[in-house]
Image: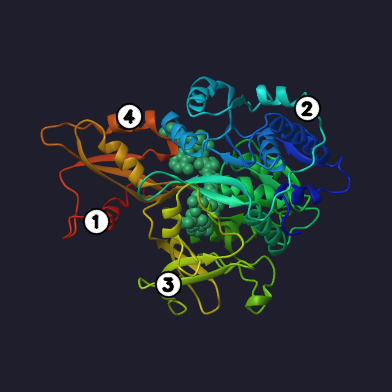
Amino acid sequence: MSNQNLFAALRDAFPADLDRTAVETDDGLNHSWRDLDRASAMMANLLDSLDLPPASRIAVQVEKSVEAMVLYLATLRAGHVFLPLNTAYQSAEIEYFIGNAEPAVVVCSPKNFGWVSKIAFTAGTRSVFTLGDDRTGSLLERASHMSDRHTPAVKGDNDLAAILYTSGTTGRSKGAMLTHGNMRSNAVMLRDYWRWQSDDVLIHALPIFHVHGLFVAIHGALINGSKIIWLSKFDPKLVIAKFPQATVFMGVPTLYVRMLAEPSLTKAQAAQMRLFIAGSAPLLMETFKDWQDRTGHTILERYGMSETVMLTSNPCGPDVRYGGATERRGGTVGFPLPGVALRVTGDDGQPVPAGEIGGIQVQGPNVFKGYWRMPEKTAEEFTADGFFKTGDVGKVGNDGYVTIVGRSKDLIISGGYNVYPAEIEATINDMPGVAESAVIGVPHPDFGEVGVAVIIAKQGAVVEPDRVIATLKSQLANFKIPKRCWVVDELPRNTMGKVQKNLLREQYKGSFA
Ligand code: MLC
Ligand code: AMP
């Protein structure tokens, strides 16, 4: 199965009976496997009809819908490169991504067509289509005239399948280039490691513009021919209500925290579920234990990144590589997945002994090809012997379990979304009257961690915290906005004059207690 278009690999796994339901939506529609095949063929034929250069970028900022998933499949099928964009991104953010990636096609929500198309056409994009979450828009209209048969483009393991933008600790966002081989190998391996069964049913409640919802969840179900219960957004009551019809659920920790607040979450309600998977952000021990008590299920925590898809996982069944270990150990992210080499290194770059803390580095068929048009950044993030420096800090126990203890990258993970303080600080520092700012992550009961801003005003200037928040809201995606803002006289500094964020984190850690 090597050197195969990822779409073809997924298509090969469709069940023999194509009339069975592949996707059931929360608005009462059933899409069969045949529907997915035909609809993706029509959209792929539409892309073919545009005569795009091979491996053109197809940038997509649309609300979650089955048709948006089909657009992803069609992009793979036609041999182009999918570039998903968070629906919260505002015009300056979109302008950067489109300017940097130079997509040949942009697909946006009908309501955003005015401003998105202006940005896209200015950047040289050939076609801008619209796709609503209610099956409206020019993309479906144009695709409806196309043939429903399509031969997938021939793609090799090394060919690009997607670009995911991930913000940088300094500078602008970087586009992580993932290949057909990266994603196919990861999907096939997870199918076995998580012991997908032919009658599994996945509840899909995550957004589809990041690795978790787009790749891990969708590939997981499709490569196994498993039905998806498709929820347009996460609603804890609805997800719990669907448990008796499903077997697998994937979520960021915030989703588990919110479900635990629902009285309807009981052992009886979750009795039929086989597997609860969590990742994208640290799962608190308290959430892990509460889930066990309330449902009788032990959450399987795993660890991944945009640059690598999935890296480690707690076992789903006995892992023969680790003496048949079966324990899903809370507070750990389990073992390096089959095929993934993971090591922990010290400041000198040398591997540290088991149990000692250091930087996590990884290598494997899942590790990305590099950052889009940033060869220097790419070179910086890889070691001479080809390991990728994750920026996460952790340790590997004698028994092989990996624990993440922190991050060397200055990153806040809020409800599973990444927020880079440097970007928020730069925006605040541009505001009138601001001398300097520091954005730090502090614990939050719902989002796990949220950003707060600490600001110094210029001499004689008055900076209003509410004004700062309002200005940020007009410029940046909503999840990036600090949940609180303080104006202070000075920031703690070390002897080099650098702001000591660890002291600020300590000072403000109780803000949401
Ligand atoms: C929403 N808000 C957030 C937020 N999500 N604030 C901080 N962090 C977040 N994650 C804020 C909005 O700004 C808004 O504020 C208010 O909450 C309501 O917005 P909403 O959109 O209605 O929120 P809600 O639907 O409740 O969304 C919460 C959520 C969502 C947890 C369901 O954030 C979510 O789906 N997170 C999952 C992210 C994810 O899929 N990550 C995977 C990354 S892949 P205001 O002030 O404007 O009202 C990855 C690799 C890997 O990391 O290993 O998987
Ligand atoms: P992203 O760049 O959005 O793909 O986010 C990847 C980052 O999320 C990783 O580098 C980790 O810091 C974090 N992450 C993912 N899964 C976990 C987990 N299970 N526990 C702790 N952090 C995680």
Q: Residues within 10 Å of mark 1 (few under 14, many from 20)?
A: few
| Residue named by callout 3 | 345
Tell me the element at label 2.
loop
Q: CA distance from mark 4 to mark 2?
A: 45 Å
Tell me the element at label 4.
helix
At 46% across and 34% down in the image, what residue appears?
A: 99
Tell me the element at label 3.
strand
| Residue named by callout 4 | 471
Kindly report which numbered mark, 3 or 1, lies closer to the viewer in this rendering. 3
- Do residues under tags 4 and 2 come within 8 Å of each other at their CB atoms? no
Of the numbered discs 3 and 2, the one sitting upstream in the chain is: 2
Horizontally, residue 56 falls left or right of residue 390, namely right
Q: CA distance from mark 3 to mark 4?
A: 41 Å
Horizontally, residue 320 falls left or right of residue 504, namely right
Kindly report which numbered mark, 2 or 1, lies closer to the viewer in this rendering. 2
Front one among 245 and 492: 492
Q: CA distance from mark 3 to mark 2?
A: 53 Å
Residue 257 rendering spot, x and y as whole percentages:
52, 49
Q: Is mark 3 within 8 Å of ligand 2?
A: no
Of the numbered discs 4 and 2, the one sitting upstream in the chain is: 2
- Do residues under tags 3 and 2 come within 8 Å of each other at their CB atoms? no
Q: CA distance from mark 4 to mark 1?
A: 26 Å
Front one among 141 and 503: 141
At 59% across and 22% down in the image, what residue appears?
A: 110
Kindly report which numbered mark, 3 or 2, lies closer to the viewer in this rendering. 2
| Residue named by callout 2 | 146
Q: Is mark 4 within 8 Å of ligand 1?
A: no
